[in-house]
Image: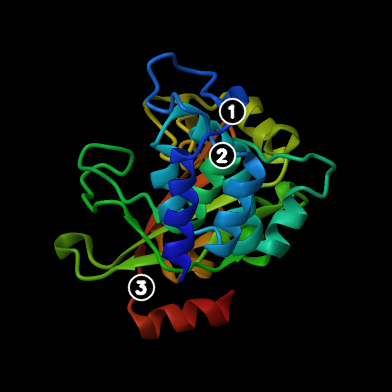
Amino acid sequence: MMMALFFMGLAFEDMPLSKQYRCIHSGTCACTKGHLTEDIIFLVFQQLNWNPKLIAAFSCSCKWFDDFAKRVLWKEFCKTRAPKMMIDLQSSGSHSVDGSWRALGKLLIYCSGCTRGGLFDNIHIPGHFVYRTRFSRTSGKSFLLPQCRSDVLYVSDPCEHLDQGEDGDIGFFRGIFKSFSVSKVRKLLIKRGAQLHPTEACPYCKAKLWSMQEAKMIPQSASCRLGAYEDCIEYYVCLNGHVLGVCTLLPLSESEEASELE
């Protein structure tokens, strides 16, 4: 039923439409007959429960669709997928989030993995979509130095990739800061003279990255929260406040003991 509604909406493009909705970005766009109104597109995707794969496919149709998806559809997806988190991220009065709604939508559902020779040295695990991930503001406190714990950071549970040979059990985690531009973490990174990574960029928004390990800003409580070895955790934060990190997970019995110590 949902798929039928989606294709029904796309079929409307064959009907005579006012050209006020023509693509304003590209004269070579295939959509030369005009577009559906934003209201109709909104209702179609509402019935589809803001399906992220369909939003992504829709965005590839033309630049006008891509612009509408960035402004509206990804925002609605984020609000539906993590409503309490979105209310908190916007509670400072902003109607947007750092790095765009599309970047945040991708962060909610995509584990970035790592390519060999990339951010995390010799680890090679392809990125992939995840069905559902829990993001926690309480967990985020464990990733902050004591002097920065008034900042708000949401961090996911680790996405586990087990039995990775010599690397052991690997966990990738991701997160987002609220109002990162005015956060204490950002101010401390600048105060410590932290350098941006010379080549790698955030997989969610393409912004430059700071290494929290190089800045010596990863507290012991982070490994306890993740159930990971203390000297095998690394994470980066980008200029828009997106967090991505990796750790080597403890065996289950040992990770339970680490949680008790925390």
Can you say whether 38 is above or below 253 in the image?
Answer: above
Residue 152 placement, left or right of 30: right
Task: Give the Cα distance between marks 3 and 1.
Answer: 55 Å
Please tell me which residue is depicted at 53% across the width and 50% down the height of the picture: 105
Residue 221 visible: no
Rendered location of residue 191, percent (x, y): 66, 26
**Viewer-proximal residue among 94 and 183:** 94
Instruction: Provide the secondary structure element on which disc 3 rests.
Output: loop
Tell me the residue that label 1 is attached to.
Answer: 21
Residue 129 visible: yes
**Viewer-proximal residue among 166 and 55:** 55
Mark closer to the observer (3, 1):
1
Residue 36: numbered disc: 2
Residue 250: numbered disc: 3
Q: Amino acid at mark 2?
A: Leu
Rendered location of residue 38, percent (x, y): 63, 40
Q: Amino acid at mark 3?
A: Leu
Q: Residue furthest bottom?
A: 253
Category of crowding for the residue at label 2, using alpha-carbon neighbours closer than 10 angstroms: few (below 14), some (14–19), many (at least 20): many
